[in-house]
Image (spheres, rainbow, N blue to C red):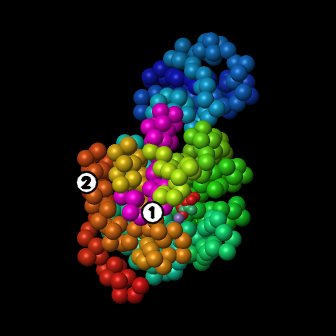
């Protein structure tokens, strides 16, 4: 249930209503939007009479019951206003949200060694990324496949952050590693396979780090939003939803199926920012640019793209990784499209890869 306050309601009045509500064993959450102040009521409101609440104050404009099972994640909870996730990076604040430029997250699937992560970081930055992604702990289908370099990879991500000022996004798989990951990551990734690891969701919800919540392999939109609800309910309001392809019957020509309809559907259901990962969605680098373009056209707030200096030798997800050269070309195309949709800023301007010293170093060594 939410209480929508009339414009210019005095703070003291809002506080008085809040006290009244809390006496009914409900938790309140105040959301100050651009146009309205909304008081969210969390708990069992089934026995609560809407009219009785309305009578609490003449400053109350409306009392609305939220029927969806996800409450804090629902668009109604914010009275239709989209939320923003603002992340502090060494290069400055980056905002994920519908009224902001497209945020680009790029990097290898796994952090393999210092040389490749530093050079990749310089290249993706030069081509307009604000975040470097890279896995230290990898969720692999086979226990015999490369599992990630763990803590030493986290240290390399910290070095890349220092060298480039890019924000870092990396996955936590096990709650036991959460403190270490949270120390280095600017955004903590919950991978598709852990989307319904509820105890892990509660734990990241208790941190103050923004969380990137990937959609589970076979999760419905509602499952996914209920998982976001776990993080929000634990006190962390900074959640970004990442569609990364779902399982369908065809696995011969694509790894997963990118549910592009998730973008407008999420927009109608939730205020949370949206990211699209065309790399895991298709599994094939050739198809990544087209799906990235489709995602921009459909209104994504952010893209996550896997990039590797030498995909043929990648320790994980080589077939879907763009080379640094291809990534740079693709970014030029994406920038044109994002500009068309008013989702680009010259603040993130890219430069020619040939001017990029890091790339020259990489070419010489890899
Ligand atoms: C990844 O980002 O490298 C990854 C493993 O993603 P997902 O959880 O979407 O498979
Ligand atoms: Mn990957």
Mark identifier at residue 337: none
Q: Secondary structure at mark 2?
A: helix
| Closer to us: 12 or 5 | 5
| Closer to us: 348 or 6 | 348
Query: Which quarter of the rendered picture does the N terminus lie within?
Result: top right
Q: Residue at x 63, y 51 (%)?
A: 195
Residue 307: name its quadrant.
bottom left
Please give the residue where the numbered disc 1 appears in the rendered image: 284
Q: Residue at x 35, y 54 (%)?
A: 290
Q: Is residue 37 visible?
A: no
Please give the residue where the numbered disc 2 appears in the rendered image: 336
Q: Residue at x 73, y 19 (%)?
A: 47
Residue extent of the magenta highlight: 261-289
Foreground: disc 2 or disc 1: 1
Q: Position of residue 341 (x, y in %)?
A: 29, 45
Q: Position of residue 69 (x, y in %)?
A: 64, 32
Dominant secondary structure, magenta: helix
Q: Residue at x 71, y 21 (%)?
A: 46
| Closer to us: 30 or 271 | 271
354 left or right of 280? left
Q: Residues within 10 Å of mark 1 (few under 14, many from 20)?
A: many
Give the answer, above or below, for where 283 lies relative to 163: above
> Dots 2 and 1: beta carbons under 8 Å?
no
Residue 93: name its quadrant.
bottom left
Q: Position of residue 23 (x, y in %)?
A: 73, 25
Disc 2 beta carbon < 8 A from ligand 1?
Answer: no
Q: Earlier in the sequence, mark 2 or mark 1?
A: 1
Q: Quadrant of ligand 1?
A: bottom right
171 left or right of 313? right
| Closer to us: 273 or 287 | 287
User: For residue 167: magenta?
Assistant: no
């Amino acid at each position: 249930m939410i209480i929508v306050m009339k414009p210019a309601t005095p703070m003291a009045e809002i506080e008085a209503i809040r006290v009244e509500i809390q006496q009914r064993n409900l938790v309140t959450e105040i959301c100050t939007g651009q146009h309205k102040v909304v008081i969210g009521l969390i708990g069992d409101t089934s026995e609560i009479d809407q009219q009785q609440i309305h009578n609490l104050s003449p400053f109350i404009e409306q009392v609305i019951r939220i029927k969806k099972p996800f409450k804090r994640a629902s668009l109604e909870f914010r009275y239709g206003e989209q939320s923003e996730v603002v992340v502090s990076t060494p290069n400055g604040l980056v905002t994920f949200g519908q009224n902001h430029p497209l945020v680009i997250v790029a990097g290898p699937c796994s952090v393999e060694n210092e040389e490749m992560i530093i050079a990749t970081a310089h290249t993706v930055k030069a081509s307009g990324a604000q975040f470097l992604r890279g896995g230290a702990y990898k969720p692999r289908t086979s226990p015999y496949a490369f599992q990630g370099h763990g803590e030493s990879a986290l240290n390399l991500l910290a070095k890349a952050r220092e060298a480039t000022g890019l924000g870092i996004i990396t996955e936590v798989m096990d709650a036991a590693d959460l403190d270490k990951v949270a120390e280095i990551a600017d955004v903590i990734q919950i991978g598709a396979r852990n989307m319904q690891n509820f105890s892990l969701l509660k734990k990241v919800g208790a941190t103050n780090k923004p969380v990137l919540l990937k959609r589970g392999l076979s999760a419905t939109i509602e499952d996914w939003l209920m998982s976001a609800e776990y993080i929000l309910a634990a006190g962390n309001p900074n959640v970004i939803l990442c569609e990364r392809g779902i399982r369908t019957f065809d696995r011969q020509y694509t790894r997963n199926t990118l549910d592009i309809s998730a973008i407008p559907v999420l927009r109608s259901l939730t205020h949370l920012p949206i990211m699209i990962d065309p790399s895991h969605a298709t599994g094939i680098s050739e198809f990544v640019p087209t799906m990235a373009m489709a995602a921009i056209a459909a209104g994504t707030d952010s893209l996550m793209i896997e990039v590797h200096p030498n995909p043929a030798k990648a320790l994980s997800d080589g077939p879907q990784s763009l080379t640094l050269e291809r990534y740079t070309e693709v970014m030029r195309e994406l920038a044109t499209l994002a500009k068309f949709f008013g989702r680009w800023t010259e603040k993130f301007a890219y430069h020619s890869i040939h001017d990029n010293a890091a790339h020259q170093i990489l070419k010489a060594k890899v």
